[in-house]
Image (cartoon, coloured by chain):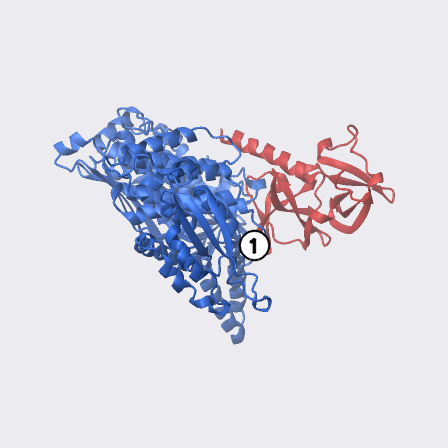
Chain colours: A blue, B red
């Protein structure tokens, strides 16, 4: 149907690999001795290099090659992965990211990073390291004192099918040192038995190099399973070569055996290591590739749209069936209802992505914060497999960054203070996700000093956000933190304290129809909890009528419904107040803001909706009931309207608008001050 | 003009009040009988409705408002022409009200002239050209431009109201 740009595919793949690389590097900082981690880092680098070169990202391939060369020393155990080295490696990873995202731009700084990397590797070198001049695999200069080796290999039978080019492999071998290459054609069958997709030709490469095993391993890194490779010192090899050279053609299957015997002890010593790390990782990756596939997000959206249409069509059928006396129609409507509900759930399930992909990004953030602020931090995540709608996960990244920064910068005290308070010097920041009914609760907690209600109160009064004698619960006080421009930090740091950020968090979470709560335990820490609906595509709605128009209010925003008192009709200015169990709630007549023609119903209802800290009553003519609402976005023509967040299609096929409660609450609150002063004057 | 291939343009002709308009046939997706229209409060008058087109919520625009014409009440000839156009570079499906839909016809490029700068009761930049057929004038509206400019006006209107 659609052809994808291979460069995009590479980018997408590289992004995942870079994530893997970053994760590996961060893990390595914690467990410096873990050979599997080193190997996984190395593998990620090698794959980026290989596919980068394949898709024409030359700058990437070159940079990664040098990165890889430096990191090779760690892999060989010649250098330790010190924190300094990891830090530079992370910078290098960022640089690769830039190179991949902007292949045409000339991005400076690469050389500096490589130099730093080299220095870090050399600096980290153990004093007892056997060699001082590193034999970087691709530098022919190291070859001078080399020995001659005979490398013989037959590619695995599926190599050509998967796009391996033997010539490139030979080129790579040639880069290790001067070679003489000969083709071994002994296995090529007669023409009638010839399968052009099989690599019949083996290669014999006489190579001059100091200690080429590592470099040769790298060349064949992705082919080792099933391939036939032997590396022998040249003098020993000659005798055996004669035995191997001309095997009978029928004997292809038994071929691996003699070659394995031909492998001398030296390379056999390396076998256990690769047997352990490589195949395990490879099979895991292969299984994963087999059981999942990449799908364009746009196609998923289309699928979701279709399912939405189906749900609407089905509810129309339901209406008709309810009016009919035909039992057949009724039963098929019921059947269809069940099927479409199942289909809807499955489709929504497809869009669900584990939140772990998001969490792993923050490990880097905490790592960098820890370095920049000089605070030791342990970052603990849990619930990585909790699933959320993909779009939601993307939009959660920014708010969580703010919350984590706040936790690290404001929440955690400096080490001296922590010790004085009897806590471990290392602070803890915990990020967790759990299901809570139809919602997901994501919380960021720290074990710092906790929020100080008095200080927040003082600051809020100073900024005129609350009256000096206002009675507020702690929770209400904490919500003030999300007011624009609010900050209690005495000093503004580069990271936070400017009072920008928390209001952004609030707004984003509101936009996702979620809520945010803060709780604190003085001296023990603070927890910010985000509660989010599982999906953005379908919500429960309350259907109301104003004049002849029907509208939907997201049910999650509805607090309660009350009758509009008869005497509240006196003031027709459009806004007014309602006494809901002792607290004043401003209300808006939707008839007024919608400029509805005709007379209002005799008994008007008020739907009290809340958004964050604010509550507002919406006066409507009739409350019709609850319905499943498939959210449709409004077109560009109606982009300027902020009273509505979207539209939906009702069971009878007509369109109803969805009210944007966050906006209406803001609208109601902004007139609250005026209303209050009016009321004071009246009293 | 680029929309004329081989010297002519395939166009759908329709009547708005007392004028004939032509819309490039390729952009028309379907023609519907008048369906229930949901009014959008505080939306601009030229696009204050929403309709359900096969499960999609589609805005309904009224070019009669844009061109300052009378709006005769809907009758048995009234149709909704659903078409796809670009608004600020984003492909958008829009319905427009037509008092009557005539036919799909070829308009000869030679007969089409740019709208006159003066002597026209409409904004000249909303008219892509005026063609002639059987002695009648056919107005070819520049839909993309209309929606973009009107949309921008609306955006500023609401901003002003909010301020």
Image-based side of A310 in relation to A428, left or right: right
Q: How many marks?
A: 1
Task: Please state the horizontal and vertical placement of residue A94, each as a whole percent of the image.
Answer: 40, 36
Q: Which quadrant of the rendered structure holds the C terminus of chain A?
A: top left
State the image quarter where residue A24 is shown: top left
Residue wearing tag 1: A654
- Image point (68%, 37%), residue name: B66
Q: Report x, y in % for residue A445.
A: 26, 41
On what subunit does the disc labeled 1 rest?
A: A
Q: Is residue A316 visible?
A: yes
Q: Quadrant of residue A264?
A: bottom left
Side of A499 where A350 appears, left or right: right
Instruction: Check the image and name the residue furthest to the right.
Output: B135
Nearest the camera: B38 or A221?
A: A221
Give the x, y percent position of residue A369. 30, 33
Tell which residue pokes out farthest to the bottom in this image: A327
Q: Residue at x 47, y 30 (%)?
A: A107
Picture quadrant where residue B120 is located: top right
Residue sitting at 43 percent across and 62 percent down? A243
């Amino acid at each position: 149907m659609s052809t994808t740009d291979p460069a995009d595919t590479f980018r997408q793949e590289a992004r995942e690999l870079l994530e893997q690389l970053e994760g590996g590097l961060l893990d390595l900082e914690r467990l410096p001795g873990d050979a599997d981690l080193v190997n996984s880092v190395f593998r990620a680098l090698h794959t980026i290099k290989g596919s980068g070169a394949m898709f024409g990202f030359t700058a990437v391939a070159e940079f990664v090659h040098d990165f890889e060369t430096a990191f090779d020393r760690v892999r060989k155990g010649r250098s330790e992965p010190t924190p300094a080295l990891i830090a530079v490696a992370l910078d290098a990873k960022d640089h690769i990211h830039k190179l991949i995202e902007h292949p045409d731009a000339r991005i400076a700084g690469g050389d500096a990073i490589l130099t730093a990397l080299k220095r870090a590797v050399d600096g980290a070198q153990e004093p007892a390291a056997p060699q001082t001049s590193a034999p970087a695999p691709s530098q022919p200069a190291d070859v001078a004192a080399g020995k001659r080796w005979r490398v013989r290999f037959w590619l695995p039978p599926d190599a050509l099918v998967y796009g391996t080019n033997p010539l490139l492999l030979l080129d790579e071998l040639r880069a290790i040192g001067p070679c003489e290459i000969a083709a071994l054609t002994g296995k090529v069958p007669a023409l009638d038995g010839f399968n052009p997709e099989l690599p019949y030709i083996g290669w014999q490469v006489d190579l001059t190099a100091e200690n080429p095993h590592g470099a040769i391993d790298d060349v064949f890194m992705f082919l080792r399973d099933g391939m036939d490779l032997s590396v022998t010192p040249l003098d020993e090899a000659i005798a055996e070569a004669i035995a191997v050279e001309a095997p009978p053609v029928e004997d292809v299957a038994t071929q691996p055996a003699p070659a394995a015997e031909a492998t001398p002890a030296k390379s056999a010593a390396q076998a256990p290591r690769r047997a352990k790390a490589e195949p395990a990782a490879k099979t895991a990756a292969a299984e994963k590739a087999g059981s999942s596939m990449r799908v364009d997000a746009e196609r998923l959206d289309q699928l979701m749209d279709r399912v939405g249409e189906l749900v609407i069509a089905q509810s129309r059928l339901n209406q008709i069936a309810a009016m009919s006396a035909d039992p057949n129609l009724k039963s098929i409507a019921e059947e269809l209802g069940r099927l479409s509900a199942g289909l809807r759930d499955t489709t929504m399930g497809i869009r669900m992505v584990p939140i772990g992909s998001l969490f792993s990004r923050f490990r880097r953030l905490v790592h960098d914060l820890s370095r920049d602020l000089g605070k030791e931090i342990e970052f603990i995540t849990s619930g990585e497999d909790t699933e959320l709608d993909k779009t939601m996960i993307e939009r959660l990244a920014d708010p969580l960054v703010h919350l984590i920064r706040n936790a690290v910068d404001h929440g955690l005290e400096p080490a001296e203070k922590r010790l004085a308070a009897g806590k471990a010097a290392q602070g803890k920041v915990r990020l967790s996700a759990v299901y809570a009914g139809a919602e997901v609760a994501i919380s960021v907690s720290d074990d710092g000093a906790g929020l100080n209600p008095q200080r927040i109160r003082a600051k809020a009064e100073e900024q005129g956000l609350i009256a000096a004698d206002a009675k507020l619960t702690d929770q209400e006080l904490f919500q003030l933190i999300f007011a624009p421009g609010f900050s209690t930090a005495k000093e503004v740091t580069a990271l936070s304290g400017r009072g920008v950020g928390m209001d952004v968090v609030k707004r984003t979470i509101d936009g996702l129809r979620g809520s945010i709560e803060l709780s604190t335990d003085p001296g023990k820490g603070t927890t910010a909890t985000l509660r989010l609906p599982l999906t953005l595509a379908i919500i429960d709605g309350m259907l109301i009528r104003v004049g002849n128009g029907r509208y939907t209010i997201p049910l999650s925003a509805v607090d309660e419904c009350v009758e509009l008192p008869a005497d509240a009709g006196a003031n027709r200015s459009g806004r007014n107040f309602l006494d809901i169990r002792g607290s004043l709630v401003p209300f808006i007549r939707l008839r007024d803001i919608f400029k509805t023609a005709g007379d209002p119903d005799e008994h008007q209802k008020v739907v009290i909706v809340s958004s964050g800290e604010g509550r507002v009553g919406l006066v409507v003519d009739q409350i019709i009931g609850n319905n499943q609402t498939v959210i449709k976005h409004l077109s560009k023509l109606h982009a300027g309207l902020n009273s509505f967040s979207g539209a939906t299609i009702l069971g009878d096929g007509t369109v109803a608008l969805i009210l944007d409660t966050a906006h209406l609450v803001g609208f109601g609150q902004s007139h609250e001050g005026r209303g209050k002063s009016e009321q004071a004057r009246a009293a | 003009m680029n929309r004329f291939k081989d010297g002519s343009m395939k166009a759908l002709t329709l009547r708005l009040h007392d004028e004939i308009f032509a819309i490039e046939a390729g952009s028309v997706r379907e023609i519907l009988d008048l369906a229930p229209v949901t009014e959008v409060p505080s939306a601009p008058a030229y696009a204050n409705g929403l309709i359900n087109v096969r499960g999609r919520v589609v805005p309904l625009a009224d070019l009669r408002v844009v061109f300052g014409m009378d709006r005769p009440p809907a009758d048995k000839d009234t149709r909704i022409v659903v078409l796809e156009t670009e608004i600020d570079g984003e492909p958008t499906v829009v319905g427009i009200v037509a008092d009557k839909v005539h036919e799909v016809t070829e308009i000869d490029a030679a007969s089409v002239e740019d709208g006159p700068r003066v002597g026209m009761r409409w904004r000249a930049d909303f008219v892509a050209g005026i063609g002639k057929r059987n002695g009648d004038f056919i107005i070819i509206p520049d839909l993309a431009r209309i929606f973009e400019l009107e949309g921008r006006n609306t955006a500023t209107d609401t901003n002003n109201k909010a301020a």
